[in-house]
Amino acid sequence: MKIQKTQNSSPKSGDADYVYQLQRLHEGYFAYMQSNVASDVIMNGTCSLAKMKEAFLPTVSSMTFPLHSPLARLFYSEILTAMDRGLSPKWYGTWVPSQESCYEESLNVGVSALYIQDYYSAFASCAVGLGLALIVLLGETLISHIMRKVRTT
């Protein structure tokens, strides 16, 4: 209901909608989902925004060609070569503006280090589960053994 209400109050044209959404983002209490390149450009020069370190729905750039185009085979090998040589991050750094110093701090929002103590409950649960599974397996084996003896006598 709230999404529809918000959507109805938003402008419908592409550029106006983008500017409107960025304005709401800077006002606070909103999140904006965008590709890494676009979010890096949006965050450039401002320390009032935070970017999640975790990603979802990873995006991959692609090129489209007409069906059965000989260019597709030509570009495929060249693009793979560029990716294997690590040129993509280099080009990304060349074309995307450099970030301010507060950018690195924003990556740590909501992220905390995990220590071995944090895993004790998981280890205990696994041990209990394995123990119960072993008891059930031994019980089934014992019952199966007893049933075989009863049938033979």
Image (spheres, rainbow, N blue to C red):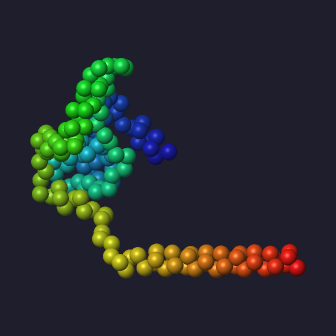
* Residue 28 picture location, percent across and down: 29, 53
| Left or right: 139, with 85 as reference point | right
Q: Note whether residue 27 is visible.
A: yes
Q: Is residue 59 above or below residue 65?
A: below
Q: Note whether residue 42 is visible.
A: no
Q: Is residue 17 above or below residue 127?
A: above
| Left or right: 2, with 117 as reference point | right
The residue drawn where x is 29% and y is 71% is 113
The residue drawn where x is 43% and y is 79% is 120
Direction front: furthest residue: 152
* Residue 32 picture location, percent across and down: 32, 47
| Left or right: 1, with 56 as reference point | right
Residue 131 sits in quarter: bottom right
The residue drawn where x is 27% and y is 50% is 27
Q: Is residue 77 above or below residue 49?
A: above
Of the pair 5 and 149, the residue shown nearer to us: 149
